[in-house]
Image: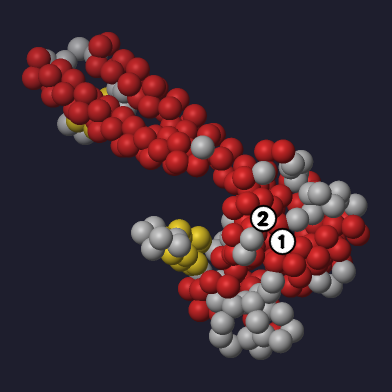
């Protein structure tokens, strides 16, 4: 099976394999730095922290790092996956590029200047894993990618829950509005002694603001739910 296809092959089997924990991931990073394995340290961080797949690493070029964004076109040429490089990782990659005097092409290269192979990447990560006391069946590219996916899924799930709670609260309690120089809530309106015109103006403003705010939250919630469904 071609090397570029192995990422999908391993992810298909991911449910039957142990998962790398956040603590083990941090231990891999710490150990790689202590061992002076800068390329392996950055590889671990790029895959596990930024979500770049092994087959996508050749697209992580000097120019992409400088731009802070990696755009990968799918094999069928119909979709493009956009990966934002975190600022802290971008800085480390730029320093690495400068020290290695890489002027163009992929950031992760072998000694002869060709893109880093999966075999070499796996071997280097396993070597760090042994020193970090991380089980060999966890110190690999597949587990790093899975850790990133799981982390992002948790973030989206938590965000969706917060949006749902905020939406429910808005629909129940409304949103304060400013009318005639005063901040009004639904509770204020019911207890205030105002003329009919003011009462109607505040009531309409509260309703409009409630549905506007709820609508914005609802759209964001739909986007999150859609993203979750696509990744399920």
Q: Secondary structure at mark 1?
A: helix
Residue drawn at (66%, 88%) of the image: 101
User: Viewer-proximal residue, 180 or 16?
Assistant: 16
The count of marks equals 2
- In the rendered view, does 41 fall on the left or right side of 8? right
Q: Horizontally, is 5 left or right of 175 in the view?
A: right
Residue closest to the eye, 128 or 158: 128
The image quadrant that residue 29 belongs to is bottom right
| Residue 143, image x, y percentages | 71, 50
Spatial CA distance of label 1 from label 2 is: 6 Å
Q: Which residue is mark 1?
A: 44
Give yes or no for contact between labels 1 and 2 (Cβ–Cβ under 8 Å).
Answer: yes
Residue lying at 67% horizontally and 44% vertically, measured from the top left: 13
Q: Is residue 49 visible?
A: no
> Would you say residue 129 is visible in this rendering?
yes
**Left or right position of 114 against 229:** right
Q: Nearer the viewer, residue 148 or 178?
A: 148
Give the SS element for disc 2. helix
Q: Position of residue 108 (x, y in %)?
A: 66, 75
Considering only vertical position in the picture, is 121 above or below 159? below
Q: Report the disc number at residue 71.
A: none
Residue 161 % position (x, y): 49, 29
Q: Is residue 69 above or below residue 114?
A: above
Judged from this view, the residue extending furthest toward the front is 1
Question: Quarter of the image containing the N terminus?
Answer: bottom right
Identity of the residue drawn at 47% across and 33% down: 160
Estimate how packed mark 1 is, as few (under 14), some (14 to 19) or many (20 or more) residues with alpha carbons within 10 Å.
Answer: many
Q: Position of residue 187 (x, y in %)?
A: 31, 15
- Label 2: few (<14), some (14–19) or many (≥20) C-alpha neighbours in 10 Å: many
Residue corresponding to mark 2: 48
Determine whether, in the image, residue 159 is placed left or right of residue 226.
Answer: right
């Amino acid at each position: 099976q071609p090397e570029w296809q192995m990422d999908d092959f391993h992810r298909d089997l991911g449910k039957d394999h142990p998962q790398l924990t956040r603590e083990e991931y941090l231990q891999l990073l710490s150990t790689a730095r202590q061992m002076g394995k800068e390329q392996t340290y950055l590889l671990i961080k790029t895959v596990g922290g930024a979500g770049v797949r092994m087959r996508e690493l050749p697209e992580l070029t000097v120019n992409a790092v400088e731009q802070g964004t990696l755009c990968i076109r799918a094999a069928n040429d119909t979709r493009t996956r956009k990966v934002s490089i975190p600022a802290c990782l971008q800085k480390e990659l730029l320093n690495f590029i400068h020290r290695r005097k890489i002027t163009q092409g992929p950031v992760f290269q072998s000694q002869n200047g060709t893109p880093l192979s999966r075999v070499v990447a796996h071997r280097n990560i396993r070597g760090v894993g042994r020193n970090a006391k991380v089980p060999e069946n966890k110190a690999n590219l597949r587990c790093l990618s899975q850790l990133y996916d799981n982390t992002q899924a948790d973030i989206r799930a938590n965000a969706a829950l917060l949006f749902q709670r905020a939406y429910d609260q808005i629909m129940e309690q409304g949103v304060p509005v400013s009318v005639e120089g005063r901040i009004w809530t639904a509770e204020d309106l019911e207890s205030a002694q105002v003329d009919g015109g003011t009462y109607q103006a505040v009531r309409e403003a509260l309703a409009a603001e409630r549905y506007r705010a709820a609508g914005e939250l609802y759209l964001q919630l739909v986007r999150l739910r859609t993203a979750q469904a696509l990744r399920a």
